Amino acid sequence: FIRKLPHHLVESFKSTLDEVREADILLHVVDISHPNYEDQYGVVNKTLQDIKAFDKPTITIFNKMDLYEKNTFDPWLEEEVRAEILTDLKERWEGETQGNTVFISAIERTNLEELRKVILDKVRDLYKIRYPYKTEFLY
């Protein structure tokens, strides 16, 4: 991961990431099944701060929810308890990301429609700010 790279590669990687500053919206995809996903999330955000791109509108996408659930929950765990744990997880990250979070499983195609809607809403919001005189063209 980023912080484990040799110093010269980190600098090279950061110069590549400079392109991020040109983006209108960032999609921060997190592998939630990774044991250190929280650390990785933090390292990416620190890198975004370092390159002065932390103020960009960002949607955090937690991918691999299928593996997260498989690795986290015992098969005997009651569905109500499982649902409560997932609700707590989602609420925590909603707070951390100011509500710009979507939990998906790309391989199982879970929640992809919600992701599409969140991206479209974010693009629509930016469009209204940039082109307030053209908002009647939005659907």
Image (spheres, rainbow, N blue to C red):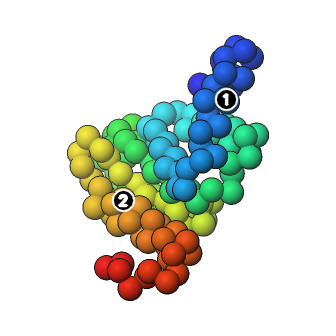
Q: Is mark 2 on a helix, strand or loop?
A: helix
Residue 51 is situated, as x and y percent measured from the top left of the image, at 72, 40
Q: What element carries label 1?
A: helix
Tell me what residue is drawn at x 55 percent, y 50 percent: 23
Q: What residue type is labelled 1?
A: Ser
Relative depth, front residue between 104 and 122:
122
Residue 92 visible, this orientation: no
Q: Which amino acid does label 2 sit on?
A: Leu
Tell me what residue is drawn at x 52 percent, y 81 percent: 132
Q: Image quarter for residue 136?
A: bottom left
**Marker disc for residue 115:** 2
Residue 56 visible, this orientation: yes
Alpha carbon separation for disc pair 2 and 1 = 29 Å
Sequence order check, earlier mark of 2 and 1: 1
Residue 8 is situated, as x and y percent measured from the top left of the image, at 72, 15
Left-right relation of 99 to 46: left
Instruction: Give the labeled residue for mark 1.
Output: 15
Q: Are there few (<14), some (14-19), or many (20+) residues within 10 Å of tag 2?
A: some
